[in-house]
Amino acid sequence: MKAKARRFSIAGRVWRWIYKPLRNDYGVCNYTERTITIDSGRAHAGLERLDTEIHEALHALQAFATEEHTADVASTLAGILWGLGYRLTEEHAGRGYLGE
């Protein structure tokens, strides 16, 4: 069964955002296929999941950035958004995107 993908425009190109179980990562950015895959198989929620979502989006936006820089920026932005009250709602949790 193929994982359902959402589509987003990132830096003027269409990227597919996919949720499926991953073995070794919480998220993966594939530049060749323009896909971002987020792990749905482990207990990956809350601030940690928000951090992963931002982290992979940053990879798509800034392929030139180091992993350390990407991780630092993602954690900072996730902390700010979390502090402002952004959460994955129960209504949207099964569909794999952040609710309003």
Image: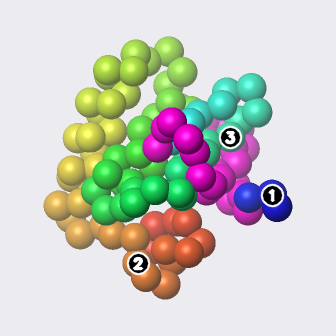
Q: How many marks?
A: 3
Residue 71 falls left or right of residue 39:
left
- At a point 72% along the width and 44% down the height, the residue shown is 14
Callout 1: helix, strand or loop? loop
Q: Distance between the residues labelled 3 and 1?
A: 14 Å
Separation (CA) of disc 2 from disc 3: 24 Å
Residue most extreme to the left: 83
Sequence-wise, the earlier of marks 2 and 3 is 3
Q: Mark 3: which secondary structure?
A: strand
Residue 95 makes an appearance in the image: yes
Tell me the mark number nearer the camera, choosing from 3 and 1: 1
Q: Which mark is residue 35?
A: 3
Which residue is denoted by mark 1 in the rendering? 2
Q: Can residue 56 be seen in this view?
A: no
Q: Do the residues labelled 2 and 3 touch (CB within 8 Å)?
A: no
Location of the N terminus by quadrant is bottom right
Nearest the camera: 17 or 45?
Answer: 45
Residue carrying label 2: 89
Report the amino acid beneath label 1.
Lys
* Residue 22 within the segment the image draws in magenta: yes
Task: Pick the residue in front: 68 or 24.
Answer: 24
- Out of 93 and 74, give the one closest to the viewer: 93
Quadrant assignment, res 75: top left
Of the image marks 1 and 2, the number of the one nearer the N terminus? 1
Please provide the residue range marked out in magenta.
4-26
Q: What element carries label 2?
A: loop
Classed neighbour count for the residue bearing mark 2: other residues with Cα under 10 Å, few (<14), some (14–19), many (≥20): few
